[in-house]
Image: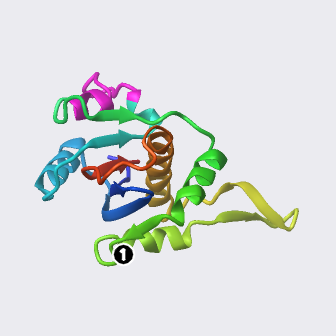
Amino acid sequence: GDNTSIWFAQSLAMEFHIIDHMSSSLKDLGYYIKAIKERPYIYGRHYLPHDAKAHELGTGKSIEEQTRAHFPSSVFVTPKLSVADGIAAARAIFGRCWFDREKCSDGLQSLRHYRYDRDDDLNTFKREPLHDWASHDADAFRTLAVAIKGLSKKQEARPARPPTSAWS
């Protein structure tokens, strides 16, 4: 029922083609699984945020377990990193990303508006980014960046891979 954002990416040598994006709120997991399956992609991997291992009260199963039921052997949970480390991972790959202008337009708008909150008392920025409408897409992009950084260490110059989805 929370906000969920998903980026779809394909790695090509040292570039990352961000080919699609979706974001919604107050939808159950089945909605997102259906939307992913309806897209015309053959998936390589699905990366979930670190908290996907937590069990839900309603089902007793984790998001990871429920997603794995639909995509056996292709679901991975990214490691938990600090927000600062996730932002660093996103900055490290951003210059090598190519975005589909139309399919990613809403996500790109969120990335443009993702920012740190101000601390008026100290006349500086706070340590954590502002949690607002842009946060969920940015969090999902951080999940993608963490996944890509982990993959790029293993496979620096491989041919194109099937699209990947990264959730938050």
- As drawn, the residue found furthest toward the right would be 122
Amino acid carrying label 1: it is: Ser
Coordinates of residue 97 in the picture (x, y in percent): 45, 65
Tell me the element at label 1: helix
Q: Is residue 11 above or below residue 54?
A: below
- State whether residue 111 is above or below residue 79: below
In the rendered view, tell whether residue 136 sits above or below residue 148. Answer: below
Seen at 51% across and 40% down, the residue is 153
Q: Position of residue 28 (x, y in %)?
A: 24, 45
Magenta highlight on residue 57? yes
Is 72 included in the stretch rendered in magenta? Answer: no
Q: Residues within 10 Å of mark 1 (few under 14, many from 20)?
A: some
Residue under the image location 23 percent in, 29 percent down: 73
Task: Out of 159 and 125, give the one closest to the viewer.
Answer: 159
Q: Is residue 75 left or right of residue 16?
A: left
**Residue at image mark 1:** 105
Q: Which residue, as the protein is rendered here, is positioned at the far bottom?
A: 102
**Relative to 128, is 5 on the left or the right?**
left
Residue ranking furthest to the top: 60
Q: Position of residue 125 (x, y in %)?
A: 77, 63
Name the image quarter holding residue 95: bottom right
User: Does residue 60 appear to the left or right of 116 in the view shown?
Assistant: left
Magenta extent: 53-68
Which of 53/97 is in front?
97
Name the residue rendered at 36%, 48% in the picture.
158
Asked where in the image residue 98 lies, by quadrant, the reply is bottom left
Residue 125 vertical position relative to residue 56 in the rendered view, above or below: below
